[in-house]
Image (tube, rainbow, N blue to C red):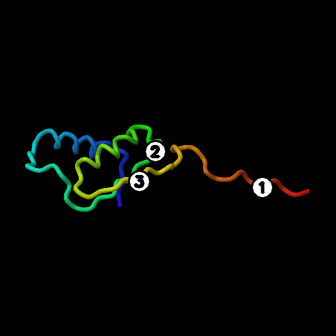
């Protein structure tokens, strides 16, 4: 498997998004939906999860108290016994 660090895939996705504007008659998600969201997301506010529920016929949301990337959840190493 070949992997690349190039952002071309992400950029092309957004380019395609704006080229073909598809109009949907009903913007409501009709399947049961669960929205999982990190409370301390660095880019997306937790309130956005609650606002997203308005677009779902049957949904619930759950906020995760996950730590920010780079913070450690590990316990400090045990001190050696003397």
- Comparing 46 with 22, the one in front is 46
Closer to the camera: disc 3 or disc 1? 3
- Nearest to viewer (mark 1 / mark 2): 2
Residue 64 coordinates in the image, percent (x, y) = 47, 51
Q: Residues within 10 Å of mark 3 (few under 14, many from 20)?
A: some
Mark 1 Cα within 10 Å, few/some/many (few <14, many 20+)? few
User: Which residue was labeled with disc 1?
Assistant: 78
Q: Which residue is mark 3?
A: 62
Q: Give the SS element for disc 1.
A: loop
Report the residue at 61% width, 51% height from top: 73
Between 71 and 12, the one nearer to me in the picture: 71
Estimate how packed mark 2 is, as few (under 14), some (14 to 19) or many (20 or more) residues with alpha carbons within 10 Å.
Answer: some
Residue 69: x percent and y percent? 51, 44
Alpha carbon separation for disc pair 3 and 1 = 34 Å
Say whether residue 32 is left or right of residue 69: left
Q: Quadrant of residue 80?
A: bottom right
Indicate which disc residue 28 carries.
none
The residue lying furthest to the right in this view is: 82
Q: Position of residue 30 (x, y in %)?
A: 19, 59
| Above or below, comparing residue 35 to residue 71 in the picture | below
Residue drawn at x 34%, y 53% is 35
Q: Position of residue 5 (x, y in %)?
A: 37, 46
Q: Secondary structure at mark 2?
A: loop
The reply, left or right, for residue 10 in relation to residue 76 is left
Going from N to C along the chain, the mark reached first, 1 or 2, is 2
Residue appearing at x 10%, y 48% in the figure = 24
> Dot 2 corresponds to which residue?
39
């Amino acid at each position: 498997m070949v992997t690349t660090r190039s952002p071309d895939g992400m950029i092309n996705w957004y380019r395609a998004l704006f080229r073909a504007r598809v109009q949907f008659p009903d913007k409501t998600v009709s399947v049961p939906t669960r929205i999982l969201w990190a409370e301390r997301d660095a880019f997306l506010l937790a309130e956005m999860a609650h606002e997203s529920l308005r677009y779902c016929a049957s949904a619930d949301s759950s906020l995760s108290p996950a730590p920010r990337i780079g913070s450690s959840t590990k316990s400090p190493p045990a001190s050696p016994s003397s």
